[in-house]
Image: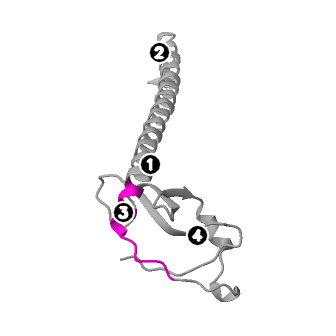
Amino acid sequence: MLKGTILISPDDKESYLAFFVKSQIVDNRESKKDDSIADERLVMVYQTNDGEFHITSPAKFIDLHAPAEFAKPIDPPASVNSEEVVTWSFMNITQQQLIDTKNHVEKDTADRKRYLDFGFTQVIMDLQVQITELHEKVLLGDAKLQ
């Protein structure tokens, strides 16, 4: 069973139930606490009176007020099955988040590999130039190099 409070939106015309959903993608590294989180999102999911779920910004909660500020009597909503919210959130938020995270990690890995290849190539070229210069000096009989 989910617990919550009744809040009123001065902007919305229809009533709805809203839920904060924290969706995390974790990798399979051993972790001590939260160091293996690859991606995390906080989303506001709301359910309309017809039972449909929708996503909106969590910032929407900023404009909500307690019903005591209004003269309108409020009937408490019926209990909500948390399994329904979790299942919908997994199917519509977390699965796409996993795909996005995988794409981001693959791009990041490719970028890092390209940067490392470029960096090591530069170091190798610089060392080869130094070795060539030293070989030239040895061939010319520079006694200091010995």
The answer to which of marks 3 and 1 sits earlier in the sequence is: 3
Q: Give the quarter of the figure containing the C terminus.
A: top left
x 44%, y 52%: residue: 93
Q: CA distance from mark 3 to mark 4?
A: 19 Å
x%, y% of residue 63? 68, 72
Assess disc 4: are there few (<14), some (14-19) or many (≥20) residues with their C-alpha within 10 Å of its C-alpha: few
Cα separation between marks 3 and 2? 74 Å
Circle 3 or circle 2, nearest the eye: 3
Q: In the image, which disc is placed on residue 15?
A: 4
Which tag is nearer the camera, tag 4 or tag 1? 4
> What is the x, y in percent for residue 18?
52, 68
Q: CA distance from mark 2 to mark 1?
A: 56 Å
Relative vertical location of residue 114 with respect to residue 128 in this rendering, above or below: below
In depth, the one of 88 and 126 nearer the eye is 88
Instruction: Kindly identify which numbered label has been placed on residue 84.
Output: 3
Q: Is residue 90 left or right of residue 138?
A: left
Is 82 part of what is drawn in magenta? Answer: yes
Q: In the rendered view, does 13 fall on the left or right side of 34?
A: right
Q: Secondary structure at mark 1?
A: helix
- Cα separation, mark 4 vs mark 1, equals 28 Å
Identified at 52% across, 56% down, the residue is 54
Residue 117 has which mark? none
Q: Please give the residue where the numbered disc 1 appears in the rendered image.
A: 97
> Which kind of residue does numbered mark 1 sit on?
Gln
User: Label 3 amino acid?
Assistant: Glu
At label 2, the amino acid type is: His
Label 2 crowd (10 A; few <14 / some 14-19 / many >=20) = some
Does label 2 or label 1 sit earlier along the sequence?
A: 1
Location of residue 106 (image quadrant): top left
